[in-house]
């Protein structure tokens, strides 16, 4: 069976908590999933697949289509036979994170390392996208812009981002960086790799409480990935299979990932690049 791999961006419309499930003896009781090497926030492929399957089951009545994409529950179909899904789901990697500013409500911070990781994944998994060459060219253009924080803006010359000063990148470079707006959105800020890594180490932490008759019975602290963060993920499918694209169109490209759906966490928009 021949496969093709599609690239999707995942924009967090609300705060997200996809829990690691690890035992933690620190101040934060519930931490988000992170890459064991880079320590970047991620969404494990199993979490992605589970959330998307649940999403499909709410939208589609055709169980055969669902089983074709994800595999039958307990790997058995309605005939009691084993069936694995035709699609392959990969871990979602962080691309950008919103940071506070004195000139805009927020800027979308990213680093050259995250873009290079995206380029490497597109090459390794042979993603057939016209954007691949453009993203590779962006990495070349930004190769020497790693000494300080740069704003990708033609209207703002300087700003303070999370107590750090940022200056505008050369305006003549902006046309060469246009693909980043399509990929991440507007109001972009390029951070040095080390500075970006420090940003993602200190994600927002929210205190949660369970009350009974106005009395606290369980206070805990939960780490979140803030809204307007952007991830990317790869999904491999049989070359002649369009089921997953149909699913995303039906869903208006919005699905829920992770915990706390009842309080609005984890609602995301998928966009195929």
Image (cartoon, rainbow, N blue to C red):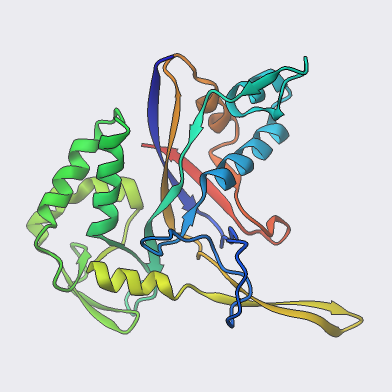
Q: Is residue 107 left or right of residue 82?
A: left
Quarter of the picture holding the C terminus? top left
Tell me the residue at 50%/62% (across/down). 227
Percent coordinates x, y for residue 49 in the rendering: 58, 39
Q: Is residue 49 left or right of residue 210?
A: left
Q: Is residue 4 above or below residue 222?
A: above
Tell me the residue at 9%/62% (across/down). 144
Q: Quadrant of residue 109?
A: bottom left
Tell me the residue at 32%/33% (across/down). 125
Q: Is residue 164 left or right of residue 134?
A: right
Percent coordinates x, y for residue 32 in the rendering: 54, 64
Q: Kindly tell me whether residue 175 is visible in this rendering.
A: no
Q: Kindly tell me whether residue 196 is visible in this rendering.
A: yes
Q: Quadrant of residue 248?
A: top right
Q: Quadrant of residue 147?
A: bottom left
Quarter of the picture holding the N terminus? top left
Tell which of 251 and 51 is nearer to you. 51
Tell which of 161 and 223 is nearer to you. 223
Tell me the residue at 14%/57% (across/down). 142
Percent coordinates x, y for residue 272 in the rendering: 41, 35
Percent coordinates x, y for residue 264 in the rendering: 66, 59
Q: Is residue 172 left or right of residue 153?
A: left
């Amino acid at each position: 069976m021949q496969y093709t791999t599609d690239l999707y961006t995942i924009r967090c419309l609300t705060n997200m908590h996809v829990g690691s499930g690890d035992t933690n003896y620190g101040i934060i009781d519930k931490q988000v999933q992170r890459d064991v090497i880079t320590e970047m926030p991620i969404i494990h492929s199993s979490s992605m697949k589970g959330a998307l399957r649940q999403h499909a089951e709410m939208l589609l009545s055709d169980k055969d289509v669902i089983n074709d994409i994800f595999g039958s529950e307990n790997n058995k179909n309605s005939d009691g036979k084993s069936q694995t899904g035709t699609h392959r789901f990969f871990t979602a990697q962080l691309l950008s994170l919103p940071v506070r500013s004195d000139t805009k409500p927020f800027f979308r911070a990213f680093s050259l390392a995250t873009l290079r990781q995206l380029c490497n994944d597109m090459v390794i998994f042979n993603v057939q996208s016209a954007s691949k060459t453009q993203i590779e060219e962006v990495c070349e253009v930004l190769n020497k812009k790693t000494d300080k924080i740069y704003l990708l803006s033609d209207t703002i010359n300087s700003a303070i981002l999370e107590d750090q000063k940022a200056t505008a990148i050369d305006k003549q470079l902006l046309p060469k960086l246009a693909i980043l707006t399509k990929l991440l959105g507007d109001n972009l800020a390029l951070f040095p790799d080390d500075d970006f890594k420090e940003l993602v180490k200190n994600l927002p932490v929210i205190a949660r409480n369970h009350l009974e008759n106005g009395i606290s019975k369980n206070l805990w602290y939960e780490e979140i990935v803030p809204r307007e963060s952007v991830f990317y993920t790869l999904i491999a499918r049989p070359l002649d299979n369009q089921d997953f694209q149909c699913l995303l169109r039906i869903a208006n490209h919005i699905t829920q990932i992770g915990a706390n759906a009842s309080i609005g966490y984890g609602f995301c928009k998928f966009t195929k690049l």
